[in-house]
């Protein structure tokens, strides 16, 4: 084990899967920086509760659809902590509708947040990680990035793009010992899926071999695996955390 505490950045750490990742990496011993955009109170409540438990957790406002906001936020984190070991590109949005009703704005908003945001975060951490000659980037895609989904042309394109981003970056950064992997969650119980009614929930669950939705912590467990110092020879991979849905 290295004799310094490693630093992890989790985008969209204020709710859902990101919140579970922040908690898990803090328990794993990382100094964790979470980001929020529109939920400052939730972010502060998470940080306070973890700090009262002895964990080192900080939250910063960062709009993942803005290059300026990302660069300023990541520069601040690196200036404060002196390093950055893990980036989890988790922040994401949906603007679902059928193609004929989808506006150019719906497309741009989702692509800019989910895919361009992840690209910009990767770019901002690449320099410090390259000089450390070590780093981990973990992209949160979706099974709809693998399989597509009617009504989610924008979202599934952004998530498929994250898989291409993962595999290309894994090749570019391997010589600097930076490992880049991707997680494709299925149906996870968060605010994002809270919009479904009971019939939609049941219809979804019935298609899943494990016959249930997952808890956000079940995605965080896999992030923990990729972030772990012992995971030294896995890069460019996509792991579906979906109860067997996409096999
Ligand atoms: P939630 O809607 O519960 O939370 C989204 C998070 O992203 C929040 O922390 C939010 O921050 C942040 N966020 C949204 N827009 C921005 C922005 N412009 N800048 C910075 N942060 C932003 O989502 P989930 O937890 O469900 O999803 C997390 C990730 O997992 C997403 O990338 C999603 O696509 C993916 N995923 C989720 C699945 C599911 O079933 N839930 C399935 C497959 C993939 P704030 O509240 O502060 O604005």
Image (cartoon, rainbow, N blue to C red):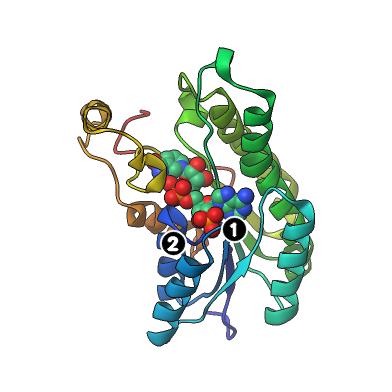
**SS at mark 1 in the image:** loop
Name the spot of residue 2 as percent of width and height, x first: 57, 80
Confirm whether residue 188 shows in the render.
yes
Name the spot of residue 162 as percent of width and height, x first: 61, 38
Q: Is residue 61 above or below residue 98?
A: below
Q: Residue at x 77, y 69 (%)?
A: 75
Q: Read off the residue under disc 1.
A: 37
Q: Residue at x 71, y 66 (%)?
A: 73
Q: Residues within 10 Å of mark 1 (few under 14, many from 20)?
A: some
Choose top left, top right, bottom left or bottom right for residue 62: bottom right
Callout 2: CB less than 8 Å from ligand 1: yes
> In this view of the protein, which residue sits in the foreground, 161 or 97?
97
Q: Which mark is residue 228?
A: none
Q: Residue at x 65, y 37 (%)?
A: 109
Name the spot of residue 194 as percent of width and height, x first: 34, 42
**SS at mark 2 in the image:** helix
Q: Is residue 86 above or below residue 110?
A: below
Q: CA distance from mark 2 to mark 1?
A: 13 Å
Q: Is residue 153 above or below residue 163?
A: above
Name the spot of residue 82 as percent of width and height, x first: 72, 79
Callout 1: CB less than 8 Å from ligand 1: yes
Q: Read off the residue under disc 2.
A: 19
Q: Are marks 2 and 1 in contact (CB under 8 Å)?
A: no
> In this view of the protein, which residue sits in the foreground, 142 or 181?
142
């Amino acid at each position: 084990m290295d004799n310094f505490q490693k630093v992890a950045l989790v985008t969209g750490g204020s709710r859902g899967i990101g919140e579970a990742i922040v908690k898990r990496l803090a328990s794993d011993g990382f100094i964790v920086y979470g980001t929020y955009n529109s939920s400052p109170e939730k972010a502060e409540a998470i940080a306070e509760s973890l700090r009262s438990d002895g964990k080192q957790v900080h939250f910063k406002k960062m709009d993942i659809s803005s290059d300026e906001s990302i660069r300023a936020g990541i520069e601040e984190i690196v200036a404060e902590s002196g390093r950055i070991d893990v980036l989890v590109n988790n922040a994401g949005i949906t603007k679902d509708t059928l193609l004929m009703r989808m506006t150019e704005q719906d497309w741009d908003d989702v692509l800019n947040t989910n895919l361009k945001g992840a690209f910009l975060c990767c770019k901002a951490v690449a320099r410090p990680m390259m000089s450390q000659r070590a780093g981990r980037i973990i992209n949160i895609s979706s099974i709809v990035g693998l399989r597509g989904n009617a009504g989610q042309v924008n979202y599934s394109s952004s998530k498929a793009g994250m898989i291409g981003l993962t595999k290309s970056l894994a090749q570019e950064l391997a010589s600097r010992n930076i490992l880049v992997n991707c997680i494709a969650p299925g149906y996870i119980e968060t605010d994002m899926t809270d919009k479904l009614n009971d019939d939609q929930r049941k219809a979804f669950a019935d298609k899943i071999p494990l016959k249930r939705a997952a808890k956000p912590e079940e995605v965080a467990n896999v992030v923990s695996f990729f972030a772990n110092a012992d995971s030294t020879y896995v890069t460019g991979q996509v792991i579906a955390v979906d109860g067997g849905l996409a096999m």
